[in-house]
Image (cartoon, rainbow, N blue to C red):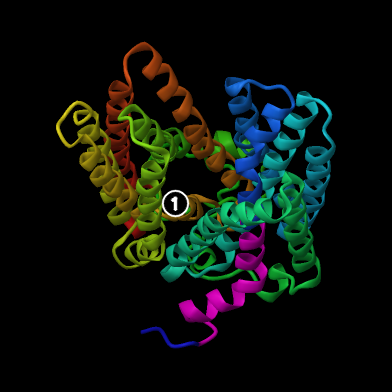
């Protein structure tokens, strides 16, 4: 059991609570309270079901588009300034959501919130990459992911309670604004994380004693993060790291795609079986609860046994779950199989908690990780954004079972990618 010292896992995590985990939880609760209302408000502004779904997707698209600019901002101005300014801009987006008179303005406001959410996520990721010691990096980042999941889980229930009390969506939007103001105050008035926790830890200690300003990622094995000693810029960094991004980055994108597919497939599968809404909600809720319960265990596995020991079982479980589910639609007891494989997918997703954050931190240059992390997060977010579109297209052209089976194949390919590239690029944490 870890003793509570300044350099113990628990000591570091306690120090990070007001600087990192607190703002994360506040932002996620507020965002989670508003996300379910986006299609409702879009419909009231004149959108049909398909267009309302497209407007809701503007949040994800905004985050996808915001990753690279966020990487530049964090590298140029630092984590604290980037998070604070992004929080202020989010308040502007919420004003747009409340007073939008047209669907276009509403969609632009939702896109802006997603764009700024990328700055929050990347700033925290960059900070922890340079401050958390390597021996418990995965636990710290898994807890970061788990904090976000907790907020997104609690937020909709708070929104439902506010709607029941006030009967107006503006109450939930105002709640997000209050959470956002608290986040901004915590960022600006709380301890400065960049001063309270100086750069250090294993990431810097392991930097090779060579001048690698002109080094490129050739695809050869490396013994840790590829070092850069001058500010290279976002696009130059993307080119330098093209090998790892095209290899391990695509494997990570496949994991993000499978995760996103789970959120889409489970409700659709329940509807296709003719189950009522309450039954589907229970199955999806149990799957999500299993997922959430395992987030810290994932970090422990990665820190103690290596990154591959979390990534590979997660991809195998989710791949097998999707492939098996694809063959159960017309079987006797299809509802029972649905519930069972939903639980399997929850276990697989829970075991992968924090792996994308951790691998990004492992691969990023120790001195200036933000530019690389912007590229890394763009790839992983793109995988998550493409998956629902792919499922929709395959369902329309083949069948829902075919779409689910295809996600199982993608998971299998991603598992092969992790086996092939994690030992090459992250040999210290296999």
Query: Left or right: where does residue 108 sit relative to residue 315?
Result: right
What stretch of residues is rendered in magenta?
5-28
Q: Is residue 123 visible?
A: no
Query: Left or right: where does residue 79 sit relative to residue 24?
Result: right
Q: Is residue 150 visible?
A: yes
Q: Is residue 8 above or below residue 64?
A: below
Residue 294 located within the stretch drawn in magenta = no
Q: Residue 301 at what x, y percent from top left?
A: 32, 64
Query: Left or right: where does residue 10 sit relative to residue 168?
Result: left
Q: Residue 178 at what x, y percent from top left?
A: 77, 59
The quarter of the rendered structure image containing the N terminus is bottom left
Observer-nearest of 421 and 46: 46
Q: Quadrant of residue 264?
A: top left
Q: Quadrant of residue 252?
A: top left
Q: Residue 123 at what x, y percent from top left?
A: 66, 54
Q: Which residue is mark 1?
A: 359
Q: Quadrant of residue 19?
A: bottom right
């Amino acid at each position: 059991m870890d003793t509570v010292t300044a350099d113990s896992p628990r000591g570091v995590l306690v120090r990070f609570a007001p600087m990192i985990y607190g703002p994360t939880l506040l932002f996620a609760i507020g965002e989670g309270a508003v996300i379910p209302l986006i299609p409702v408000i879009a419909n009231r502004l004149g959108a049909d079901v398909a267009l309302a779904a497209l407007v809701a997707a503007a949040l994800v698209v905004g985050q996808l588009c915001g990753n690279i600019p966020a990487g530049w901002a964090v590298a140029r101005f630092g984590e604290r300034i980037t998070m604070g300014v992004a929080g202020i801009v989010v308040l502007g987006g919420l004003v747009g959501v409340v007073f939008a008179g047209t669907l276009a303005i509403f969609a632009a406001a939702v896109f802006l919130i997603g764009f700024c959410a990328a700055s929050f996520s990347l700033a925290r990721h960059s900070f922890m990459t340079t401050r958390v010691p390597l021996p418990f990096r995965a636990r710290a980042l898994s807890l970061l992911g788990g904090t976000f999941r907790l907020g997104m889980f609690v937020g909709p229930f708070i929104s439902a309670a506010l709607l029941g009390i006030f009967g107006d969506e503006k109450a939930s939007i105002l709640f997000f604004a209050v959470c956002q103001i608290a986040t901004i105050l915590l960022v600006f008035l709380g301890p400065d994380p960049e001063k309270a926790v100086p750069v250090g830890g294993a990431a810097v200690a392991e930097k090779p004693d060579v001048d690698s300003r002109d080094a490129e990622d050739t695809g050869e094995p490396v013994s840790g993060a590829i070092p850069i000693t001058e500010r290279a810029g976002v696009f130059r960094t993307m080119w330098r790291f093209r090998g790892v991004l095209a290899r391990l980055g695509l494997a990570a994108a496949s994991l993000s795609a499978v995760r996103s597919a789970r959120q889409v497939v489970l409700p659709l599968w329940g509807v296709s079986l003719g189950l009522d809404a309450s039954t589907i909600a229970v199955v999806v809720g149990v799957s999500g609860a299993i997922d959430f319960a395992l987030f810290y265990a994932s970090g422990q596995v990665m820190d103690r046994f290596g990154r591959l020991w979390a990534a590979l079982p997660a991809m195998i479980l989710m791949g097998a779950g999707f492939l098996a589910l694809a063959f159960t639609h017309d079987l006797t007891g299809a509802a029972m199989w649905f519930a069972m494989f939903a639980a399997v997918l929850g276990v697989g997703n829970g075991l992968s908690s924090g792996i994308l954050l951790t691998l990004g931190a492992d691969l990023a240059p120790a001195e200036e990780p933000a530019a690389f992390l912007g590229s890394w997060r763009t790839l992983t977010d793109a995988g998550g954004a493409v998956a629902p579109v792919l499922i929709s297209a395959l369902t329309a052209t083949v069948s829902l079972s075919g779409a689910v089976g295809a996600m199982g194949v993608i998971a299998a390919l991603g598992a092969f990618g992790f086996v092939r590239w994690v030992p090459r690029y992250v040999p210290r944490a296999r």
